[in-house]
Amino acid sequence: MKKLVAEFIGTLWLVLGGCGSAVLAAAYPELGIGFAGVALAFGLTVLTMAYAIGHISGCHLNPAVSIGLWIGGRFDKKELIPYIIAQVLGGIAGAGILYLIATGKPGFELGGFAANGFGEHSPDGYGMMAALIIEVVMTFMFLIIILGATHSKAPKGFAGLAIGLGLTLIHLISIPVTNTSVNPARSTSQAIFVGGWATEQLWLFWVAPIVGAILAGVVYKFISPEE
């Protein structure tokens, strides 16, 4: 239960911090954070939680990460479903808090609410195939970073930095394409509030990250040095 509570809190923070920076700050040019600031915000949420709850739950914060770690032999199958449930609920709670804050401003319009999308709902108009490819590849690389940085032979104490900066880089690459998911819990949390097109396109932001994570688990298991 302690692990699940940690995952709930961590995923809440990821959604509140990352999506919150997009909804509350990036929408206003005078605040100056832009999409690069949003990318950094997502990375910082993971970096801070890695050191806050990494020793409790492993700081997955992402169903695709949990699945990739399981495929890579780093996570117990019996904990997989409870972790995913805790992550999705934490993400929804984070989005709920963000919604309550955002609607406190007169004239607030929900708009995309930092949801993920493709086609006309892609930030720069990228189609479904481009979205599918980038989400698979970015999640694959994210899991390679996680599996490598947390390996027993990796330098100690730096995993959080590598993973947080890795997620920042992933957002810098893929925000224009899909608004960056690589995390089904993050996508679900925003889609619930947006509804309509966001829930219709949500399937891609479950399928692609999970496929990328499974591929990374298989590949890293093959290339991994002996424990």
Image: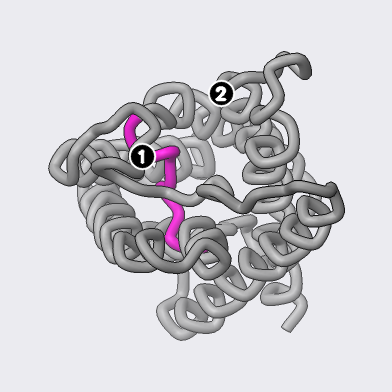
Q: Is residue 45 above or below residue 211?
A: above
Q: Which residue is mark 1?
A: 178
N-terminal label among 2 and 1: 2
Mark on residue 35? 2
Could you give the CA–CA distance between mark 2 and mark 1, rounded to whole angstroms? 12 Å
The image position of residue 170, as x and y in percent, is 43, 30
Q: Is residue 112 above or below residue 137?
A: below
Does residue 86 appear in the picture of this structure?
yes
Q: Is residue 23 left or right of residue 97?
A: left
Amino acid type, label 1 = Thr
Residue at the (32%, 53%) spot, across then down: 209
Query: Residue 68 is drawn in which quadrant?
Result: bottom left
Indicate the secondary structure of the residue bearing disc 2.
Answer: helix
Using a 10 Å C-alpha cutoff, classify the residue at mark 1 as few (fewer than 14 neighbours), some (14 to 19) or many (20 or more): many
- Count of residue discs: 2
Indicate the secondary structure of the residue bearing disc 1.
Answer: helix
The image position of residue 8, as x and y in percent, is 69, 69
Magenta stretch, residue numbers: 177-185
Q: Nearer the viewer, residue 6 or 97?
A: 97
Amino acid type, label 2 = Phe
Q: Nearer the viewer, residue 60 or 222?
A: 60
Residue at the (77%, 18%) spot, across then down: 31
Q: Is residue 88 left or right of residue 94?
A: left
